Amino acid sequence: MSTKHRSQTGTRLPDPNFVHPEVIAPETTAGKALRYVNAAIRISIGWVFLWAFIDKVWGFGFATPTAKAWINGGSPTTGFLKGATGPLASTYHSMSGQSWADWLFMAGLLGIGLALVLGVGMRIAAAAGSLLLVLMWSAELPLQNNPFMDEHLVYAMVLVALALAGAGRTVGLGRQWERLSFVQRNGWLK
């Protein structure tokens, strides 16, 4: 690989795509530990999304009673959205129990959960997960225990940090995913 290329004026410039090996720092013990901690956080948050999907579909009696499971005719959005308060309450109440809202919500839970657990599509998972969490946060306004901060916003920020850190590459399929030609052509899929 050449380390020089010509500018429009003919001047030879360093190749911006070439990384000199001496610039790449060796991984430290702390850096390696951080990669594994990030992977554990990624998988844990992914499981939170996946479990919400599983429990809402089959109603294992944790957050969703069997009688209100989606497969038994229950609506996965009704309970939460009917309880919405604050300035957006009427908007969320009108979405409650709507078929399109149920399907979109459940597809989001499943897709975000699977992507995080597998470590693939971290950018999309972080964006979609953060959006879902911020919408859930807005449905609970005004908050009871803090003027503006709750776990939804914290999780959203953690998802963004995990995507930026490339957390899907450790204990996940992120490295293999990022080598796929369609992912390389479309960086937003990383």
Image (tube, grey):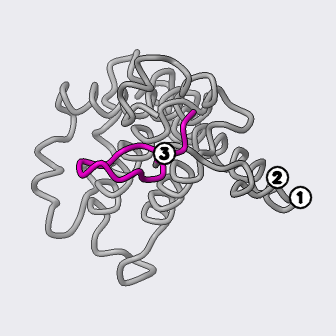
Q: Position of residue 120 (x, y in %)?
A: 54, 30
Q: Position of residue 161 (x, y in %)?
A: 53, 58
Q: Which residues are magenta?
A: 1-15
**What label does residue 29 carry, if any?**
1
- From the viewer's perspective, is residue 40 above or below residue 174? below
> Which residue sits at x=82%, y=52%?
32
> Which residue sits at x=29%, y=54%?
135
Q: Position of residue 110 (x, y in %)?
A: 45, 27
Magenta run includes residue 8: yes
Kind of residue sitting beneath label 3: Lys
Task: Judge left or right: residue 82 versus residue 70.
Answer: left
> Which residue sits at x=10%, y=56%?
90
The residue most toward the front is 10
Q: Which residue is mark 2?
A: 32
Circle 1 residues within 10 Å: few <14, some 14–19, many ≥20: few
Kind of residue sitting beneath label 1: Thr
